[in-house]
């Protein structure tokens, strides 16, 4: 870990072929080749993350929501737009980030933890390990957009599960209510993916499985 301006940067590498000494040398070489930005944007002050006032509860088990290919496609488009957007750093955006306070729920074991913004009860981030991958769980944004165009039709509850990796966002089978982390991990482990959205590079193709249609 190192400081770059007001930011903390964490670099992680693993190898199944290099020895610890070789890997360390490889990392030193890679670090020396990184061109850090000359003008570092201002970041909000880092603060410790404490426990949430009350942990999430899941009294009723979540089930698969009815299939909605339109909502899945819309969520994919929104996910791509958000990942590729270049928000200009301004005092207002820094203040908005600083206003967010993260909290965590009790330890789930297996190096997995729930994090929430401002103790939100409808959205959570499921951190899986320490490699930067995570799973966002919350109301389906695509279904919300479609519901705005179908005002005469009552919107059915629909919650999305999106795995965020270094190269893509992967959407899994939507649920009829906020799913527990155990339910989320079951769906991900079963590879019940619906969409895949590249988040960098020239490829801008959104993949959607036939099972979702």
Image: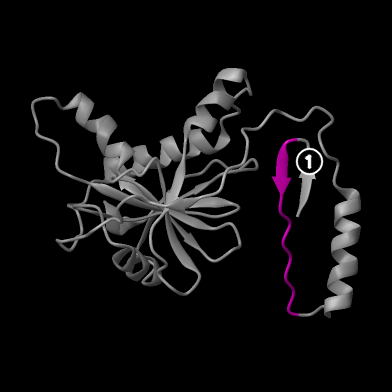
Q: Is residue 30 visible?
A: yes
Considering the image in quadrants, where does the N terminus appear? bottom right
Which residue sits at x=78%, y=45%?
A: 3
> Does residue 118 appear left or right of residue 3 in this picture?
left
Q: Quadrant of the rendered structure where residue 5 is?
A: top right
**Residue under circle 1?**
4
Q: Is residue 8 magenta?
A: yes
Tally of numbered discs: 1
Q: Give the extent of the magenta segment.
A: 6-16
Which residue sits at x=61%, y=33%?
A: 44
Which residue sits at x=59%, y=63%?
A: 130
Which residue sits at x=31%, y=56%?
A: 55
Residue 117 point in image, percent of width and height: 41, 42
Q: Nearer the viewer, residue 9 or 105?
A: 105
> Does residue 185 appear left or right of residue 112 in this picture?
left
Residue 133 point in image, percent of width and height: 54, 58
Q: Secondary structure at mark 1?
A: strand
Residue 148 point in image, percent of width and height: 22, 26
Magenta stretch: dominant SS?
loop
> Does residue 185 appear left or right of residue 60 in this picture?
right
Residue 183 point in image, percent of width and height: 29, 66
Q: Is residue 171 magenta?
A: no
Q: Is residue 20 above or below residue 51?
A: below
Q: Nearer the viewer, residue 137 or 41?
A: 41
Q: Is residue 170 visible?
A: no
Q: Give the color scheme: rainbow, by chain, secondary structure or one colour.
A: one colour
């Amino acid at each position: 870990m190192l400081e770059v301006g007001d930011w903390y940067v964490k670099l992680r590498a693993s190898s199944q072929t290099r020895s610890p000494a070789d890997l360390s040398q490889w990392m030193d070489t890679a670090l020396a080749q990184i061109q850090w930005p000359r003008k570092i944007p201002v970041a909000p002050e880092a603060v410790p993350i404490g426990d949430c006032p009350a942990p999430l509860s899941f009294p009723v088990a979540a089930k698969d929501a009815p299939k909605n290919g339109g909502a899945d496609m819309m969520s994919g488009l929104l996910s791509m737009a958000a990942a590729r957007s270049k928000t200009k750093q301004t005092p207002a955006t820094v203040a908005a980030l600083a206003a967010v306070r993260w909290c965590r729920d009790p330890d789930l074991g297996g190096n997995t933890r729930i994090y929430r913004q401002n103790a939100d009860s409808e959205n959570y981030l499921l951190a899986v390990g320490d490699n930067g991958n995570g799973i966002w769980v919350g109301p389906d944004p695509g279904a919300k957009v479609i519901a705005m165009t179908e005002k005469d039709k009552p919107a059915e509850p629909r919650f999305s599960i999106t795995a965020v990796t270094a190269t893509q966002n992967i959407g899994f089978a939507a649920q009829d209510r906020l799913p527990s982390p155990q339910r989320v991990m079951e769906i991900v482990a079963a590879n019940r993916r619906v969409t895949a959205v590249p988040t960098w590079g020239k490829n801008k193709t959104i993949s959607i499985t036939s099972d979702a249609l």
